[in-house]
């Protein structure tokens, strides 16, 4: 059985909703195990035990969250040259544009020689004031559907051996 690992960090709930929607989309594939882990709880062994990855992060100060960065820092060298060619996708819950956060994940994935199955999915909340940034987020139906579709596409590709 193939395994999809979804690693996420969320402070205000938006990224969690995105990761859960992707997990729900992937779970429609019964021949796949979906593991949804918070970044502090995930590590190198989780990466080694998975066949594909979804990385989900809020945009914090035009970058990936510190907790997701910590996950990458703790795992990077332990899996280097051991997960080459595996598929991945990324989800970014952005306040402004999310492009830099997406690029950071892309650079890390490039170092691991992972294959992107889709461009980063960036959902923008337009939260710009301190109050809006710290307020719990609610991702809209269309955004959550896009997350489900990425999860389903990853799951189908893993099970069919396309990726």
Image (cartoon, helix red, strand yellow):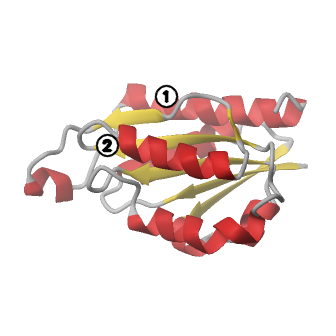
Mark 1 crowdedness (10 Å alpha carbons): few <14, some 14-19, many ≥20: some
Q: Position of residue 118 (x, y in %)?
A: 60, 28
Q: Position of residue 25 (x, y in %)?
A: 63, 36
Q: Residue at x 75, y 62 (%)?
A: 80
The residue tagged 1 is: 145
| Residue 116 - label | none
Q: Position of residue 161 (x, y in %)?
A: 89, 32
**In the image shown, does 76 or 129 lie closer to the viewer?**
76
**In the image shown, does 105 or 22 lie closer to the viewer?**
105
Q: Is residue 36 left or right of residue 69?
A: right
Q: Is residue 48 above or below residue 92?
A: below
Task: Locate the C terminus and report the quarter of the image it occupies.
Answer: top right
Q: Is residue 47 left or right of residue 42?
A: right
Q: Is residue 155 left or right of residue 42?
A: right
| Labels 1 and 2: the sequence-earlier one | 2
Q: Is residue 27 visible?
A: yes
Q: Is residue 85 left or right of residue 18?
A: right
Mark 2 crowdedness (10 Å alpha carbons): few <14, some 14-19, many ≥20: many
Q: Is residue 138 above or below residue 64?
A: above
Q: Position of residue 136 (x, y in %)?
A: 24, 55
Q: Is residue 69 above or below residue 98?
A: below
**In the image shown, does 14 or 100 lie closer to the viewer?**
100
Q: Residue at x 82, y 40 (%)?
A: 30
Q: Residue at x 70, y 52 (%)?
A: 112
Q: Is residue 32 above or below residue 13?
A: above
Query: In terms of secondary structure, where does tag 1 sit?
Result: helix
| Residue 94 - label | 2
Q: Is residue 20 visible?
A: no
The answer to which image quadrant residue 98 occupies is top left
Q: Nearer the viewer, mark 1 or mark 2?
A: 2
Q: Residue at x 18, y 53 (%)?
A: 133
Number of numbered tags placed on the structure image: 2
């Amino acid at each position: 059985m193939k395994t999809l690992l979804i690693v996420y960090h969320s402070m205000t709930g938006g990224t969690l909703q995105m990761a859960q929607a992707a997990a729900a989309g992937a779970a429609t594939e019964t021949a796949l195990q979906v593991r949804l882990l918070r970044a502090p709880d995930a590590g190198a062994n989780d990466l080694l035990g998975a066949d594909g990855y979804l990385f989900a992060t809020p945009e914090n100060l035009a970058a990936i969250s510190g907790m997701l960065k910590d996950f990458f820092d703790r795992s990077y060298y332990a899996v280097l040259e051991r997960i080459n060619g595996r598929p991945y996708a990324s989800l970014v819950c952005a306040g402004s544009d999310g492009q830099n956060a997406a690029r950071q994940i892309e650079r890390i994935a490039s170092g691991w020689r992972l294959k992107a199955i889709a461009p980063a999915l960036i959902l923008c909340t337009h939260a710009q004031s301190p109050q809006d940034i710290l307020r719990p987020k609610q991702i809209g139906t269309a955004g959550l559907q896009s997350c489900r579709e990425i999860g389903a596409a990853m799951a189908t590709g893993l099970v069919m051996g396309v990726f």
